[in-house]
Image: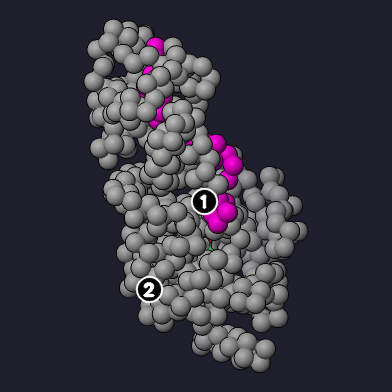
Amino acid sequence: MLKTTITNFVSRLLSAPTKGPERWSRDMHGIDRRRVSRHAVKVCEVLNQHGFDAYIVGGAVRDLIVGLEPKDFDVATNATPNQIRPLFRRARIIGRRFQLVHVVFGQEIIETSTFRAPSSGNQETDEHGRILRDNEFGTHEEDAARRDFTINALYYDPIKEEVIDFHRGVADLKNRVIRMIGDPETRYREDPVRMLRALRFAAKLGARIDPASQEPIVRLAGLIEHVPASRLFDETLKLLCCGHAMDCLRDLHRVGLNKSLIPLLDTIFEEQGGEEFVDIALARTDARVRAGKPISPSFLFAALLWRLVRKRWEALIEEGEQRNNALMLAADSVIADQTHRLAIQRRYQSDMREIWLMQARFERASVRTIWRIIEQPRFRAAVDFLQLRAEAREVDSVLAQWWMDLANSGTETRGEMIDVWQAGHSAARTRPARRRRRKKHPSASAGSSSGDQETEP
Ligand code: ATP
Ligand code: MG
């Protein structure tokens, strides 16, 4: 207990600014105000008009300074939730333990939170030091000290166009250094997810992790096990969608953080061609992220886990299971094995299943099933997935292209394409799945469990 108190005292000393914060003017921080959400500016203006301090904070400021497009805009203020809410037409208080306000402008939500105090050493923690409750309001300076990295503790005043910097975050950002505020080990223990965040920001910004912030990670990697699965899912998703996913996965592997995160991933990497498949999938994801296109989490996880699904699928067919059924069983068992650590949300799980199950149908479609497949809500995603498999040389690229063309065509062209298919011109396209079925199941071409007659053209 005494040790914890001393550590906390030291960490507060370390995180305490020696003098007032640095204040950076426009020509120093270089933020182009036109790239700042006008809604976030509006929230700050309204709060200012009512006598409160309000700043844009966190990831948005960091990204604006380095010239990246912020994902979203958060505001921090000294107004309490009950003072904030009545100032806006559409605003609601959310959260139970630590309340904050969502100010809604059409599609955009500006998350507005009251300055918060950092750990005082009196919070409820688990036996490893992980903070279970953390809900005290604090001063501006305290709010900066409880943030994770110096580069994430920058406050932008959009009216004065000034950045307030308590922890030399602008310098770290310019030098591309990820540095924990306070004592790194204590801060990782308080919240082990910060280890993942360190790797993500390093990959995203092309930065290095300061040695003192890097050193404890290998030692403390196991603490990730104690983080609730849903929280882990959110941070893992962010990691996979940061635009440098493969770099992140390799780093995770290097420091031993991957095991408790995506437990099946190690197995996938061990599979022949497994790493290559993930590499191809993530390279596409990264390209989309960098082009500012949206990413579908279900597609991403479907791709990460596919090689395992396929392996179990093949094994089940070998055991005599009917083809589509076997795929369904394989999908269910992979999802079940994975989700006890990483809580993939149910809606994503069902999309993943659909994407996977359609793969069996693409390879063995009849005219009737083709029209039915087109109607499926995840058809487009499943066709993209087929492209991925073609790129990994798992299915014939002609087959994948045929489906892509079909997806991109209007009804009339689709009719013509399907007629040609029926006329038997596409025989070569269905070959990849044939060998195994012939061996064990001479009659397995007789459709899915729903009774579809899947004739091979
Ligand atoms: P992203 O671009 O992924 O949204 P971000 O830095 O904005 O990155 P968020 O999770 O949106 O990350 O968090 C917003 C801010 O809240 C962070 O910049 C940081 O200041 C603070 N923060 C978030 N998570 C933690 C944490 N685990 N510990 C301490 N501070 C945190
Ligand atoms: Mg953010």
Residue 3 shows in this picture: yes
Would residue 416 be found to the left or right of residue 53 on screen? left
Which residue is at the front of the view, 413 or 117?
413
> What span is colored magenta in the figure?
339-367
Mark 2–mark 1 Cα distance, whole angstroms, equals 30 Å
Nearest-to-viewer mark from 2 and 1 = 1
Give the residue displayed 46% in from the left and 78% down from the top. 219
Residue 356 shown in magenta: yes
171 left or right, relative to 430 = right
Give the x, y percent position of residue 243. Answer: 36, 52
At label 1, counting other C-alpha atoms closer than 10 Å, the crowd grade (few under 14, some 14-19, many 20 or more) is some
Is residue 200 a member of the stretch shown in magenta? no
Q: Write down the residue under mark 1.
A: 338
The three-letter code of the residue at mark 1 reads Gln
Point out residue 192 in the picture as x, y percentages from the top left corner: 53, 70
Residue designated by label 2: 209
Q: Secondary structure at mark 1?
A: helix
The vertical placement of 103 against 228, above or below, is above
Q: Nearer the viewer, residue 97 or 44?
A: 97
